[in-house]
Image (cartoon, helix red, strand yellow):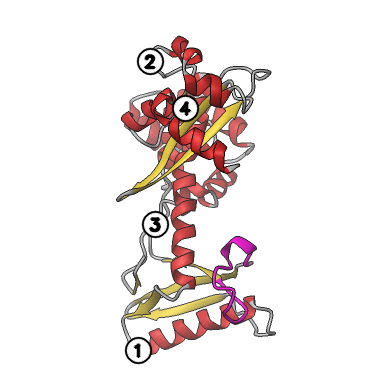
């Protein structure tokens, strides 16, 4: 953006009705200039619209505060030209459903940056496990640099009187925006996922509903099946007939592209609805500085 144009945009901020509305409204929701701004019909009379929006070819805009941490906040705006239709309420709902994922991506990006600068590390509770964990992570990072190191991929951490904790290491390709410390040696990175085999598999009902466009009762049924419940169990708990539950299951099959309960459960337990529900590290390790 040219410097003069940037200065002009800054001077018009006080007349940006959409930005003012977003700042005064709950965060993590998208708002559109043609739907949510009070007195939206007056927007075309403002200096901001005529001297900034029109020259930029912007007729409609929508935006949200995606993340707010202390004095910092991340905002996202989507714009449309006069040749495009105004934003709809359904589109705002769809954009708002992406906010948790956008927030998570921003936070992960920040964490990766901190880790690259050496501000974070993993530590286990006992020295032997800590040495093994540190060695495997270092090996994965070396492998990601392409130096010929062999990646084990799966690491089992022993636990007293419990099944081993399962760690899965995956190489991470370092792309240009993440190579912040260019003066350092070749960068490397790896992702580590922790699985507790003794934990009861679970999924987040709200995520299941949004991921697969299910109704509330369909999402409840899907989660119940993942928890090992039968159709009879669900019907009895709800006080409805088994035929009603079977009809809901058929609708779920259609929406998820599955044909059997086993396929449905497998799909849900491999979806983000499951992995995002497992958001706490097991007690055997703790994450420092994240």
Secondary structure category for the residue under label 4: loop
Which numbered disc, 2 or 3, marks the residue that appears first in the sequence? 2
Q: Give the foreground label among 1 and 2.
A: 2
Secondary structure category for the residue under label 3: loop
Q: Is residue 181 magenta?
A: yes
Identify residue for label 3.
Answer: 279
Which numbered disc, 3 or 4, marks the residue that appears first in the sequence? 4
Which numbered disc, 1 or 2, marks the residue that appears first in the sequence? 2
Cα–Cα gap, marks 3 and 1: 25 Å
Image quarter where the N terminus lies is top right
Which stretch appears magenta?
174-189
- Residue 215's tag is 4
Give the percent coordinates (x, y) of residue 123.
36, 79
Give the percent coordinates (x, y) of residue 73.
38, 45
Q: Is residue 33 magenta?
A: no
Q: Residue at x 47, y 52 (%)?
A: 106
Q: Is residue 153 above or below residue 36?
A: below
Cα–Cα gap, marks 2 and 4: 32 Å
Figure quadrant of residue 163: bottom left
């Amino acid at each position: 953006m040219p410097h003069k144009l940037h200065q002009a945009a800054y001077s018009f901020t006080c007349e940006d009705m959409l930005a003012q509305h977003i700042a005064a409204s709950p965060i993590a929701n998208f708002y559109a200039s043609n739907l949510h701004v009070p007195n939206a019909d007056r927007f075309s009379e403002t200096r901001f619209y005529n001297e900034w929006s029109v020259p930029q070819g912007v007729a409609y805009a929508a935006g949200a505060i995606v993340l707010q941490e202390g004095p910092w906040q991340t905002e996202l705006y989507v714009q449309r030209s006069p040749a495009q239709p105004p934003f709809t309420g359904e589109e705002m709902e769809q954009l708002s459903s992406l906010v948790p994922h956008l927030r998570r991506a921003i936070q992960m990006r920040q964490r990766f940056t901190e880790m690259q600068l050496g501000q974070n590390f993993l530590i286990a509770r006992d020295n032997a496990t800590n040495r093994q964990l540190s060695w495997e992570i270092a090996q994965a990072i070396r492998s990601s640099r392409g130096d010929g190191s062999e990646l084990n991929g799966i690491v089992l951490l022993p636990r007293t009187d419990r099944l081993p904790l399962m760690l899965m290491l995956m190489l991470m390709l370092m792309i240009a925006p993440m190579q912040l410390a260019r003066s350092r040696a070749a960068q490397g990175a790896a992702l580590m996922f922790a699985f507790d085999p003794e934990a009861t598999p679970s999924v987040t009902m709200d995520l299941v509903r949004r991921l697969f466009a299910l109704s509330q009762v369909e999402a409840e049924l899907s989660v119940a099946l993942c928890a090992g419940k039968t159709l009879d169990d669900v019907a009895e708990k709800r006080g409805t007939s088994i035929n009603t539950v079977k009809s809901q299951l058929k609708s779920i099959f259609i929406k998820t592209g599955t044909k059997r309960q086993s396929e449905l459960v497998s799909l849900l337990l491999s979806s983000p609805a499951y992995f995002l529900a497992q958001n706490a590290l097991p007690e055997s390790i703790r994450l420092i500085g994240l």
